[in-house]
Amino acid sequence: MNIAIITAGGKGSRMGNKIPKQFIDINGKPIIAYTIDTFERHQLIDAIVVVCLKEWMEIARVAMKRNYMSKVVRVVEGGDEGQRSIYNGLLAARDYAREAGCDNPTVLVHDAVRPMVTTQLITDCINATATHGNAIVVATPTETFIIENEGQRQLLDRDKMHIVRAPQCFHLNDILQLHERAIADGKTDFRDCCSMLCDYDIPYHMVIGPTTNIKITFPSDVILFRSLLNYIEMQQVFTPPLYDLIN
């Protein structure tokens, strides 16, 4: 069993908008619906858990219903921090899997504000987890990086660097046990599961994702997302019909 956990607990303060960024409407559809739709249509995804701000949970349910998302089996409340939201999603996934007779499903933790996740990337994560035990999506940087520490500046070799993104994929029991270990140790401010793996020196397998797998954080990201949607739409309009391609 493969369960997607979509985290939508952020308030999006950097967006400068009263509406959480995951619920911003783009062409009559909230961003979170674009994100979930790719998992909904994926043949290997059996169920979806959405972790949401308490006051937006009912709105999320309505959005799922309007967009005919039948794989969403749970909408649960998020926590004050991202780590707690992920943990709540893992617990909900565990409960659903047990009800379905599965003891240790594969879970894909993904940000609601990464709406350009692709079907191939989801497949790559599931396959990599089956082989390596986990999978962390990363991107290769194209910019120059300088780190500054106490007035000293150092140029970093970008060929040795990766940008951590999502999905982040695991066997449920492994990542749930790690979360519970962190809680027992009083560590509650990890931004994502990869940060937790690094802190506990646990090896992880990297999957290189497309550059279009952006995270919508600032207003400029919304503009970029709209542009990517328009580009996809234009491709569909001008791509020759399948009959023309094979004849």
Image: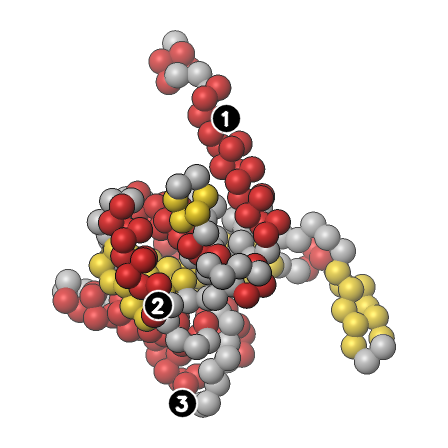
The single residue placed furthest to the front in the displayed view is: 18
With respect to residue 30, does 83 lie above or below? below
Between residue 26 and residue 188, name the one nearer to us.
26
Q: Which mark is residue 55?
A: 2
Looking at the rendered structure, the kind of residue marked 2 is Glu
Disc 3 element: helix
Image location of residue 207, percent across then percent down: 50, 54
Which of labels 2 and 3 is toward the front?
2
Q: Is residue 195 left or right of residue 129?
A: right
Between residue 199 and residue 116, name the one nearer to us.
116
With respect to residue 69, does 7 lie above or below? below
Disc 2 element: helix
For the point 55% across and 48% down, the residue is 222
Between residue 177 and residue 79, name the one nearer to us.
79
Q: Which mark is residue 180?
A: none
Residue occupied by mark 3: 184
Image location of residue 47, percent across then percent down: 25, 56
Q: Are marks 2 and 3 in contact (CB under 8 Å)?
A: no
Instruction: For label 2, count other residues whose C-alpha is less than 10 Å away and answer few (under 14), some (14-19) or many (20+).
Output: few
Residue occupied by mark 1: 234
Q: Quadrant of residue 134?
A: bottom left
Q: Is residue 104 left or right of residue 9?
A: left
For the point 34% across and 46% down, the residue is 37
Disc 1 element: helix
Q: CA distance from mark 3 to mark 1?
A: 51 Å
Looking at the rendered structure, the kind of residue marked 1 is Met
Image location of residue 164, percent across then percent down: 56, 61
- Name the quarter where the C terminus is drawn: top left
